[in-house]
Image: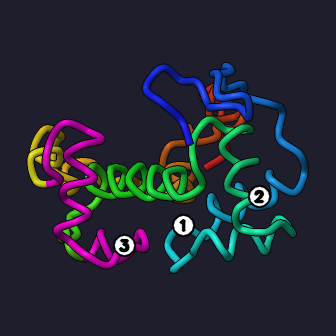
Amino acid sequence: MSTASGRAPNRSGGRRPLTIVPPGRHLLRAKDLVDARYGEPLTVDDLAAAAGLSRAHFSREFRRAFGEPPHAYLLTRRLERAATLLRGTDRSVAEICLTVGLRSVGSFTTSFTRTFGASPTAYRAAFPPASDQARVPACIRRIYGRPQRRTFREDSGTGAE
């Protein structure tokens, strides 16, 4: 339990500062799971199992290590990915919502607006359309972007024809 002052109660009823500790491997394993599989229906129980801890202990340790609860971290990753998709694709807001692992478009819109200060539609409108940002594949750039090789004879103008 935390308070607005950033302090947690201790057993004597006083307040102690909330400190962030370096994460252990078990917590990093759970964090990596979120980063890799944010689009899947992950729960805090799944993350706790990946870390090999009970749900309550995992939640406490995750918050101490990373400064936010595991569920908030998962939501943040999903919203960041949604923002990237809104900027770089023409997919619908509902499709992006489902792609990043969220189930309700209404809740997604509320969370997105709270985090980014604009609705998903308004956020997308602030960037150029994805079709204007068409990317040329690297293999095509390499083929057509290279200067043509010239031979010594072509350079000297004494080619045998």
Q: Which residue position holds label 1?
A: 38
Task: Determine whether, in the image, residue 65 is placed left or right of residue 69.
Answer: right
> Closest to the observer: 54 or 154?
54
For numbered disc 2, what is the local secondary structure?
Answer: helix
> Closest to the observer: 45 or 107?
45
Mark 2 to mark 3: distance in Å?
25 Å
**Amino acid type at mark 1:** Tyr
Q: Residue furthest front?
A: 12
Q: Residue at 62% across / 35% down in the picture?
A: 67
Percent across and percent down for residue 70 are: 60, 55
Mark 3 to mark 1: distance in Å?
9 Å
The disc label shown at residue 102, or none: 3
| For residue 72, above or below residue 40 | above
Q: Residue at 13% across / 38% down in the picture?
A: 126
Q: Which residue position holds label 2?
A: 57
Q: Which residues are magenta?
A: 95-120
Circle 3 packing at 10 Å, graded few (<14), some (14-19), many (20+), is: many
- N-terminal of the pair, mark 2 or mark 3, is 2
Percent across and percent down for residue 26 are: 87, 57
| For residue 78, above or below residue 161 | below
Q: Residue at 17% across / 44% down in the picture?
A: 123
For numbered disc 3, what is the local secondary structure?
Answer: loop
Circle 2 packing at 10 Å, graded few (<14), some (14-19), many (20+), is: few
Mark 2 to mark 1: distance in Å?
22 Å
